Structures are given as structure tokens and as C-alpha cells.
Image: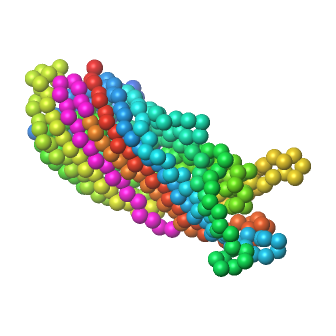
């Protein structure tokens, strides 16, 4: 979390430098950061309405998935037993509803699955700061569901080989923070926020090369007494921390635009489409596992050790697509996004019951599509 806070402070500092004046008070600088008009824009390409409060209702469908494979040798009555454990969280396509509230460049969002039960839940909070040429989007989500498991013990064709499939008795909980920062090189006539927020309105089709960074922290927790903990030598939680950097492009296609007749926004008509793709290289990739042991007297589980590995260099990416139609003070938009990360590496586990390095490969993916209806007031 310290890395995330550092990223937020850094981006806020860069934004502040871009809009602040030398003699402004701190309060004025914060207000300008949120709502001041962006200087240097081409008025023929971008229309900047006065900042207002915005309330939006959202709904859509989404799906999250985790897959992981671990290969290790365990001590089986003094003999090495090769073990392969495949595990996954693959939820269904879940409908959700949400609420967004914001002012100027800032937006806060909350959404909740409609298909909620005692062993399945998916809640998301979002923070967005979207200006014309740069922005920060932070997602936090909490996802729980029983984890599926497939275990292979021993080598195929031998007397010790066994194979079984099942799922955990209790839900496995996954929490993650995903922060995306963007910078558009064409900041004069391209408004990245026009489709996804509507605070700036694209008047003609324009595109821009983009620089992007992505920070991910994910944590998966399970009961060490459950079957997956037993089969992996006592794993109770696993975390992944990644930082990626890359460059790509974004394009706004304006199919319709009509300027409003007055400051009240009456007469405004705009239909704009966007496609954004930013390939990235993961330069920092750390994966950690926490192992638990059971006290022979009390029967309670306690942390035995935490082991980490530095994963291989990987390719990541950001993909977004959307469209927005604005009329007067209202707008309706559709959008889709896809987030993913993967990890791969070898971990040395200094436990007697594990007699080899643990080879781990895994990945997370999450996609969503949403419909957003908003009003300015």
C-alpha cells in the first residue's frame, strides 16, 4: 500500500504543478486541480463546460477469474511425492448496479453485484481523476467464491498416482488494488476524459499517443485448514505486487456534435466513440506466499513463514472502449474494460514437508461492461 500512496502523491504533485499559480493558496490550488479550465486547449477541438456536480447511475455485467498451477515435491513417508495443484476462481457473468458522484475532474464510484449470496460476492470502489490529457484511475475490489481444485499426486502410470477434483469448503477471498495512470501527448486537441466522464466534450475526431503506468496489488486468502492449504503445505494467503510501464494510443471518433445555445447546456448534442490500447512491460513483479502450521496442543493455526519470489519479465496491457451520447445536461454512455496480470517463478520453501522448490504460474483477469446514465446539476 505504501507504493500505491507514493504513486498517488506523485501524480497529485504533477497535476498540481500543471495548474497551480505561484501565489495561489493551498485551497485555491486544490480547487484548480479539481475544476479549473485546462489552459492551452484548442476550442475548435474541445469544448469545456463550466465544472458542475454530476450524479450517475451505472449497471452492467462483469466477471473475474484467477488460475494458478503449483508443482512441488512433498515428503510422503520418507519418499518424495511429486504434486501438482491446479486451482481457480472462475465466477459466472455477474450483473451489478452502482452509483457515481463527482465534481469537475473527480469521481467516486461504488458498485455491488446483484447476484449476492453467502459464498459469492463482488464489491468495487473506484476513484477517478480525469483531466483532458492525463488521469488516474484507482479500483479496489473485494471478491469471494469457493475455489476449484484439481490435484495430481505422483507420476502417471505408477502405483502411487492419484488424481482428484473438488472445491474449497469455504469461500476464498480475493482483494486487489489496480491503479492506472495515463498521459496523452496530444493535450491540445484530444480529450481522453470525454467518453468516460463527459467533463470535457470532443468537438471533432482526434487521437493521441499515450503513456501509461499500471500498479497492481492483489491478495488471495483461504482457510489453511481447507483442502487447498493441506495440499500446498499450509498456504493461507498469497499476494502479487506489480508495476508496469508502456505506451500506446487512444482515439476519439466524433460522429455528431452541436454546440449548446447557452450556458445552461440547452441544445447540446454529442456522440463520441473511443478506443484505447496501451501495451505494457512489467518491470517489477513480486509474488509472496504465507504458510501456516497447526499447534499440536491448541490446534490453532499460526504463521510459520512467508516466502517470496521475483517473477519473470511479463507483458501487460490496458484495453478500454466506450461511447457517449450527450444532450443538454444529460448523458448516457457504454464502456468496457479488461484488466489482467500474470506471474511465474520458482520459490524455495524451507519446510521439512516440502523437499523441492515450488514452481508457480498464475494469472488474474477481470472484464466488465457498463451502462452509465448521468445528469449535471
Q: Residue furthest bottom?
A: 157
> Could you tell whether 122 is left or right of 198 in the image?
right
Name the magenta segment's main secondary structure. strand
Image coordinates of residue 132 in percent, x first then y, are 26, 40
- Magenta segment: 312-332
Instruction: Based on the picture, tell me whether residue 321 belongs to the magenta stretch.
Output: yes
- Residue 6 in the magenta stretch? The answer is no
Q: Give the residue at x 49% y 55%.
A: 364
- Closer to the camera, 146 or 271? 146
Figure quadrant of the N terminus: top right
Q: Residue at x 66, y 77 (%)?
A: 155
Q: Quadrant of the C terminus?
A: top left
Residue at the farthest right position:
297
Residue sitting at 37 percent across and 27 percent down?
101
Picture quadrant where residue 189 is located: top left
| Frontmost residue, 10 versus 57 | 57
Can residue 27 be seen here? yes
Image spot of residue 185 (x, y percent): 25, 52
Q: Is residue 360 left or right of residue 139?
A: right
Observer-nearest residue: 177 or 121?
121
Q: Vertically, is 143 above or below 314?
A: above
Q: Residue at x 35, y 28 (%)?
A: 57
Amino acid at each position: 500500500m505504501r507504493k500505491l500512496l507514493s504513486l498517488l502523491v506523485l501524480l497529485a504533485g504533477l497535476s498540481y504543478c500543471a495548474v497551480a499559480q505561484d501565489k495561489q493558496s493551498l485551497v485555491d490550488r486544490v480547487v484548480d486541480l479539481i475544476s479549473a479550465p485546462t489552459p492551452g486547449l484548442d476550442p475548435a477541438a474541445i469544448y469545456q463546460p463550466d465544472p458542475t456536480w454530476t450524479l450517475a447511475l451505472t449497471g452492467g455485467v462483469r466477471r473475474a477469474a484467477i488460475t494458478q498451477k503449483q508443482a512441488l515435491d512433498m515428503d510422503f513417508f520418507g519418499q518424495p511425492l511429486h504434486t501438482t495443484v491446479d486451482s481457480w476462481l472462475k465466477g459466472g457473468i455477474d450483473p451489478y448496479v452502482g452509483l457515481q458522484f463527482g465534481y469537475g475532474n473527480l469521481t467516486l464510484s461504488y458498485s455491488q453485484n446483484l447476484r449476492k449470496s453467502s459464498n459469492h460476492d463482488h464489491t468495487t470502489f473506484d476513484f477517478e481523476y480525469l483531466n483532458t490529457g492525463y488521469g488516474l484511475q484507482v479500483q479496489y475490489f473485494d471478491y469471494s467464491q469457493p475455489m476449484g481444485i484439481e490435484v495430481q499426486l505422483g507420476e502417471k502410470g505408477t502405483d502411487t498416482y492419484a488424481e482428484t477434483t473438488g472445491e474449497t469448503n469455504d469461500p476464498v477471498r480475493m482483494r486487489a488494488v489496480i491503479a492506472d495512470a495515463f498521459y496523452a501527448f496530444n493535450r491540445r486537441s484530444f480529450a481522453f476524459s470525454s467518453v468516460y466522464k463527459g467533463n470535457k466534450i470532443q468537438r471533432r475526431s482526434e487521437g493521441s499517443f499515450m503513456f501509461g503506468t499500471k500498479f497492481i496489488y492483489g491478495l488471495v486468502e483461504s482457510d489453511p485448514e481447507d483442502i487447498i492449504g493441506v495440499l500446498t503445505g499450509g498456504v493461507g494467503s498469497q499476494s502479487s505486487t506489480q508495476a508496469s510501464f508502456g505506451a500506446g494510443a487512444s482515439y476519439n471518433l466524433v460522429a455528431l456534435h452541436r454546440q449548446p445555445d447557452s450556458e445552461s447546456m440547452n441544445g447540446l448534442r454529442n456522440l463520441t466513440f473511443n478506443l484505447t490500447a496501451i501495451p505494457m512491460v512489467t518491470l517489477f513483479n513480486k509474488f509472496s506466499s504465507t504458510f501456516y502450521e497447526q499447534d499440536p496442543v491448541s490446534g490453532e493455526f499460526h504463521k510459520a513463514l512467508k516466502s517470496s519470489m521475483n517473477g519473470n519479465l511479463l507483458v501487460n496491457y490496458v484495453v478500454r472502449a466506450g461511447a457517449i451520447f450527450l444532450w443538454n445536461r444529460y448523458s448516457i454512455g457504454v464502456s468496457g474494460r479488461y484488466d489482467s496480470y500474470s506471474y511465474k517463478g520458482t520459490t524455495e520453501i524451507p519446510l521439512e514437508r516440502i523437499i523441492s522448490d515450488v514452481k508457480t504460474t498464475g494469472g488474474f483477469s477481470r472484464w466488465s461492461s457498463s451502462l452509465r446514465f448521468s445528469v449535471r446539476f
